[in-house]
Image (tube, coloured by chain):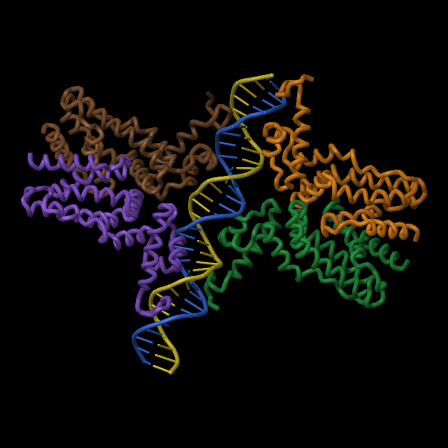
Chain colours: A green, B orange, C brown, D purple, E yellow, F blue
Amino acid sequence: MTNTRHHGNRHGRSEQARQAVLEAADDILVERGFAGVTVEGIAARAGVAKQTIYRWWPSKIDILLDAFVADMNEELTPPDLGSLTDDLAAYLPMLATFLTETDQGAVLRALAGQAQHDPAMATRFRDECVLPLRARDRSLLERAIARSELPAELDLDSAIDQLVGPIYYRVLVTGEPITREFTDSLIRDFLAMMRR
Amino acid sequence: MTNTRHHGNRHGRSEQARQAVLEAADDILVERGFAGVTVEGIAARAGVAKQTIYRWWPSKIDILLDAFVADMNEELTPPDLGSLTDDLAAYLPMLATFLTETDQGAVLRALAGQAQHDPAMATRFRDECVLPLRARDRSLLERAIARSELPAELDLDSAIDQLVGPIYYRVLVTGEPITREFTDSLIRDFLAMMRR
Amino acid sequence: MTNTRHHGNRHGRSEQARQAVLEAADDILVERGFAGVTVEGIAARAGVAKQTIYRWWPSKIDILLDAFVADMNEELTPPDLGSLTDDLAAYLPMLATFLTETDQGAVLRALAGQAQHDPAMATRFRDECVLPLRARDRSLLERAIARSELPAELDLDSAIDQLVGPIYYRVLVTGEPITREFTDSLIRDFLAMMRR
Amino acid sequence: MTNTRHHGNRHGRSEQARQAVLEAADDILVERGFAGVTVEGIAARAGVAKQTIYRWWPSKIDILLDAFVADMNEELTPPDLGSLTDDLAAYLPMLATFLTETDQGAVLRALAGQAQHDPAMATRFRDECVLPLRARDRSLLERAIARSELPAELDLDSAIDQLVGPIYYRVLVTGEPITREFTDSLIRDFLAMMRR
DNA sequence: TAGTAAGCGAGACGGTACGTCACGTCTTAAC
DNA sequence: GTTAAGACGTGACGTACCGTCTCGCTTACTA
């Protein structure tokens, strides 16, 4: 490892350039919105050649996908507080905040938006973004099953849809704020159904 | 009204042109996807000058908004079958089909997608598309209240979110198909909560 | 005619833009050489959109062809001094100066250079540049025939080639300066042959 | 010398690579024209790294210069038939064919073309290509002087210009084919002047 | 007999210009 | 006054090559 700038060699791609591109894309999205994200803008901000971007990413959407995936592990880990009620009471507001307040959430919403316009991209979006997010949702419920707080035969996918569906709906469709009351009533109703 | 093409006059805007633009936008969206919708393409297909489009619509999104609103009344009217259970059993699958199978639904998904990229447009989207759609959802529940099938003090907004949120979530996020089983379980759980 | 800038209308292309492009191309060629002539540079200097250039000229070479043709009539008119000897003594140095010293000549040399690289362009170069130039050469000799200074059956094309060929050869190949002695000896030898 | 591919050593440059580059440049020029000659294309065709090219040649023009010089000795040697008339009658058509029909001639025309665009390159072109070619022209006339067919005080440079100038002019400017009649009349007129 | 260093292939890099597409603005003549 | 037509300036697109760089391999001389 040298102290000089990496300008490309037979080791393959420059990790430096990769990071700079992902960060630039992220920053521009947050600062100027999706319409302001251009390959040229990313290249300029990252101090990278346009060709370097096209060499590694088919489109700017793929850059945002990568940027999202790269940072996803950092945030939004469902807590383990010992009971399903407490876990949900902590997690759902955390999810709402993630979706509406964080830079990561802004990227996710942009990706979800683009997925409506581009079926091929939608597939990648689901595989690389939605599935990992659902894995987090699922882990929370699986813990509850392990604790016997939920029946083992529960249809997890439907349960997740009913828990987080209304939250995504508010974020992506109605724009309604997600209050504590709203998440509490979601949890209350969900638990009531489970006990039925 | 003459039998010739309207080429401008001093009587105000041409309804002919307006219709042609809305239909062209709709058609192109369905045929080539949102990325294929361009003002120039709409103008060419509608046999209309670009300037005529810009005179009446600020952007292509506004055209799609108009196109959606113009046709919305035609479809998706919640049936009145005499009982909440039957109404929901008929309506939720109808909503799912509307969102995923119809041209109208394609327009709505495109608009929802664009709303993620453009906050100003998101406001118009909610006012002109989401609110009318929710009015339909709401009318179904209000009928049930009138029939005393639901408590009068029910928080309608939350109830709607819980009923249709998971459906929109599947449509816009996971892409999971919306089966009869899924809507049935949504309805069963909803009714269970109401009777709690 | 208004005092405002022409921004395009159904009259067709903007003469203003056309002139600006031709002048810009000319200027850049003279200032920075052929390698410095880029469509983007011309567009920037002319205050014109790149697309406007591509709308009317297939390539930058066609711009230079147009620029050359537009200005050709201005210069290099063979004088009529009453005798072939005097006409040639005035014209050949004038031609040499035109080719080596003027902006027009610089354009012509660039075009001749590019003609070596591009057969299709070479055809246009010959039709639009070389033929008109040869018409000037020819008119001088035809006048001499009318004055009976030259035989009527003279092969004009060969005569022209022998008179101006060595001059073009020096300009395009050897780079040797074209002195008065050189043109004088060309004329002397040519006249000697004619009297043979 | 081994039977394996030369992959670099401390004895200096690889003659293998040098040859491959020159041949590739030549071939590409002939096949696809000057515009198709790129450093990357040459490198790919020669099976050589781009860096190897840049190590030894400042630009692709220098490659073509080298390629021309390398092969120049092979062709276009003025014959010695015992008399100036016969020598010229053999040599001028040979020169015309060389310029218009051979791969070498194609390279020369490309170099002459580029010389119009690049003054620095023009100097090298004259020193390395034009001067050697003129040496051939000159040797023919010098032989004639030695045979006393031409006066000793003849200005050789002017004589060469008058003999070959019209030929180069046709090749580089008018594109007119160079017929036997044309070269014959050049020779006839040249000899007539000499006897004057 | 092992270093060591020069030339090599490969190929990623920061750039420049290309030619295309669509944008939103404008001007005109016809109706 | 609105229309169809279409040229305009603008800006981003994705591509092609440029010339530079770093790397690991091959090889032959040198210690």
Residue D93 quadrant:
top left
Q: Nearer the viewer, residue E17 or D113?
A: D113
Task: Say if residue D120 shows up in the picture.
Answer: no
Task: Say if residue D167 shows up in the picture.
Answer: yes
Q: Nearer the viewer, residue B81 or A77?
A: B81
> Looking at the figure, which quarter contains the C terminus of chain C?
top left
Q: Nearer the viewer, residue B78 or D22?
A: D22
Residue D49 in the image: x percent, y percent? Answer: 40, 60
Residue D58 quadrant:
bottom left
Residue D88 in the image: x percent, y percent? Answer: 15, 42
Q: Residue at x 20, y 39 (%)?
A: D165
Q: Residue at x 23, y 36 (%)?
A: D179
What count of labels does the image hold? 0
Asked if residue E22 is positioned above or below residue C78 in the image, the reply reads below
Residue C182 in the image: x percent, y percent? Answer: 15, 37
Q: Residue at x 10, y 27 (%)?
A: C195
Left or right for C53, reference B53? left
Residue E15 in the image: x percent, y percent? Answer: 44, 50
